[in-house]
Image (cartoon, grey):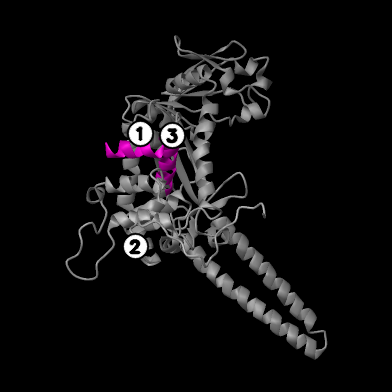
Amino acid sequence: MKRFIEGQSRIQGSLLPETLDDFVSETNPVRVIDIFVDELNLRQLGFAGVEPAETGRPAYHPSVLLKLYIYGYLNQVQSSRRLEREAQRNVELMWLVGRLAPDFKTIANFRKNNPKGIRGVCRRFVVLCRELELFSESVVAIDGSKFKAVNNRDRNFTSAKLQRRMNEIEASIERYLAEMDTADRREPEVAQVKKARLTDKINMLKARMKELEAIGAELENTPDKQISLTDPDARAMKTRGTGIVGYNVQTAVETKHHLIVAHEVTNDGLDRDQLSKMGKQARKVMRVEYLTAIADRGYFKSQEILACHKAGIVPLVPKSMTSNAKADGRFDRADFVYDRDNGEYVCPAGERLIWRYTSDQAGLRVHRYWSSKCPTCPIKSRCTPGDYRRVSRWIHEEELEVMQARLDEAPESMRIRRRTVEHPFGTLKAWMGATHFLTKGLERVKTEMNLHVLAYNLKRVMNLMGNEALIRAIRA
């Protein structure tokens, strides 16, 4: 006895199951995909090709290709070429699509031509989660993360980067010209070979310089003074590392089951203008009267916080710590206490800063306060290098103070945010691999992200409820 589990001989005959259905267990995830897609109204969701053409070659039904894509994104197979191969050899996929094997071009065109329908499917599953009462808490965490586009950093240009490249080329040309002068003093055979090689390099650099000059002329006509050559919609964005060229993906994640209730793809590298938009989308999907939205300091913007309050959203966003006074060892703005009854500020020295005038600053209507006793104050050196310490107050400053009071009463909010919203991002990036997005252009990237979010939510709910329970819920 060899004491190992042994397989069967490759030439031994065997009796396989009579039907393909016998290969797929009753709890297999492909049965969830099959039932979910079959229950959808694809025509209402906006899919093309639901009604067959009266002439021409018969086409694949949209449900077949949709099932194929959902299976692929659920199993980290996002490429149309890989999906083509899997449909020919994967038993689960054979069962799911009835042994059909579309070519990669047909698969890719389906994703390209049905952005509206695919987004509708993603939203429909979120609605199903709401109907299953998985959104029991009216709290979401909002955050953004940078995802790589199909565009190398060397193929992205800003004015500063373009000028730096042109300076490098000019320096290289000057160095090669100096080497040519040196080569003239060598033996004729060696000098001729080296000069020919250097001439080729100089000509190549001059051609590259002309390309950069053409890019520079085009750069002046762009709104944000940035150009990406491979994916025109991708933008350079700062990250904790060296930065990437890609997209900023915004998500609103409910805090109980970590399901993504709303998402958006932008090519704006900053998060400051996204808070109210994501909060409104989440509140609409969850259908709650009031929603609490937790976000990090990158979302702190006075106008966005006011917009949230007006929309029935309770924001919890810590204030940005950007005080130059505190960095210089002087009193911070927070050291000045506002007296609501008298409409004045009290400074650390106990003096009162009274209202002087109202003006517009950076799009905000603000009141300005200072005290006439600043020049003779004994602790003036710890307060301001100028003649007077002036304090500004936004006319809706009370909204920010109310939010800060809520944050002080709920110190665990930032921990909840971190463990809620960073989990989906980590999972999605692990599924995507090193390249992240595979498509080019903002609209196609949005479609790709819809499939990723749908697959993530689907797998989460399958883990929460179990496949059999989810199938029963979909059929109900």
Q: Position of residue 409 (x, y in %)?
A: 51, 16
Q: Position of residue 34 (x, y in %)?
A: 33, 49
Work out whether 413 lies above or below 460.
above
The residue most toward the left is 54
- Residue 455 part of the magenta-drawn span: yes
Work out whether 67 lies above or below 304.
below
Q: Which mark is residue 100?
A: 2
Q: Residue at x 62, y 60 (%)?
A: 164
What secondary structure is found at the residue carrying circle 2? loop
- Give the quadrant of residue 135: top left
The magenta region covers 452-476
Q: Which residue is mark 3?
A: 464
What secondary structure is found at the residue carrying circle 1? helix
Looking at the picture, tell me which residue is in the foreground, 127 or 407: 127
Q: Residue at x 63, y 18 (%)?
A: 375
Assess whether mark 2 and mark 1 are in contact (beta carbons under 8 angstroms): no
User: Is residue 246 rendered to the left or right of residue 98?
Assistant: right
Q: Residue at x 36, y 53 (%)?
A: 21
- Give the distance between the C-alpha atoms of the residues marked 1 and 2, in whole angstroms: 42 Å
What secondary structure is found at the residue carrying circle 3? helix
Looking at the picture, tell me which residue is in the foreground, 141 or 88: 88
Looking at the picture, tell me which residue is in the foreground, 204 or 359: 204
Q: Badge 2, how many Cα within 10 Å: few under 14, some, many 20+?
A: some
Q: Which residue is mark 1?
A: 280
Assess whether mark 3 and mark 2 are in contact (beta carbons under 8 angstroms): no
**What type is the residue that disc 1 sits on?**
Lys
Q: Closer to the N terminus: mark 2 or mark 3? A: 2
Q: Badge 1, how many Cα within 10 Å: few under 14, some, many 20+?
A: some
Q: Residue at x 67, y 29 (%)?
A: 328
**What type is the residue that disc 3 sits on?**
Leu
Q: Which secondary structure is most common in the magenta stretch?
A: helix
- Residue 187 part of the magenta-drawn span: no
